Image (cartoon, grey):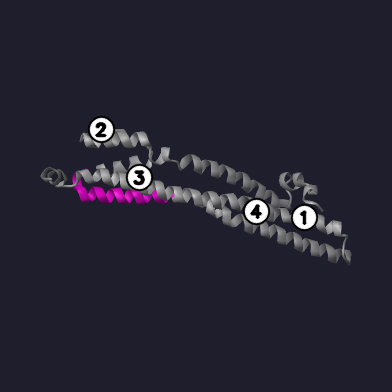
Amino acid sequence: MMLAEINWWRVLFIPGGGPIGGFLWLLSIVMVGMVIQVFIAIRRLTILPPVLQGQVSELFKARQFGDVIQLTADDPSYFAALIRAALAEASRGYHAMEKALQEEADNRTTRYLRSVEYLNLLGNIAPMIGLLGTVLGMIMAFFTIVDKGGIPSPAELADALGIKLVCTFVGLLVAIPSLTVYGLIRNRIDILCTEGLVTAQSLIMTLRPGKDKAASNQ
């Protein structure tokens, strides 16, 4: 059979493979929703808002730390959370601020990574579910041979096995985008969170004891 003669409409748009195939098609819809959600959530605008960074930097230069606290109080971004955590420990000294900054960075980064871990889980489990459906279809085909007391017509076997192979096909259809997006988003999280931590640390370092004195001696 020529590739152009394959009924792709039946393969792609009719849930084949019985209940397992239907479940995989449902997972494909879930996967699309998860991909959209992580692309919306993991962005520079939501992690390191450029406008907020500029405002905080100007306020640090002016030593208006009360305004910094107010500005970042209700901001949900990663950068705002780091600055809030550090300034909350200002009364305990520079080292306490630095420690709070690092701990908040670790907590937030872990939270972001956990939010995309479901894509990794989906990408690993979907092919296994698809393989389960295909193997089950092959077992049923062999039982059909036994029930008929001989070899059924090739058309009957080809149709049954073809539908069951849809399970493997859809499993891969779910897994490949899931793992691809997971890898891309994980790298994006690492890059943005590292950049945010470095930026926040550079601002907090201006509060280090002796910083101003060292600068004036130069």
Amino acid, disc 2: Asp
Q: Quadrant of the C terminus?
A: top left
Determine the residue located farthest toward the left in the rendered image.
Answer: 217
Task: Look at the numbered discs 2 and 4 and tell me whether their residues touch, using CB distance below 8 Å.
Answer: no
**Quarter of the view holding residue 129:** bottom right
Residue matched to label 2: 67
The image's mark for residue 196 is 3
Between circles 2 and 3, the one closer to the viewer is: 3
Q: Position of residue 182 (x, y in %)?
A: 51, 51
Task: Point out the stretch of residues depicted in magenta.
Answer: 90-112
Residue drawn where x is 84% and y is 66% of the image: 146
Amino acid, disc 3: Gly
Which of these two is toward me, 128 or 175?
A: 175
Q: Position of residue 67 (x, y in %)?
A: 25, 32
Residue matched to label 1: 162
Residue matched to label 4: 171
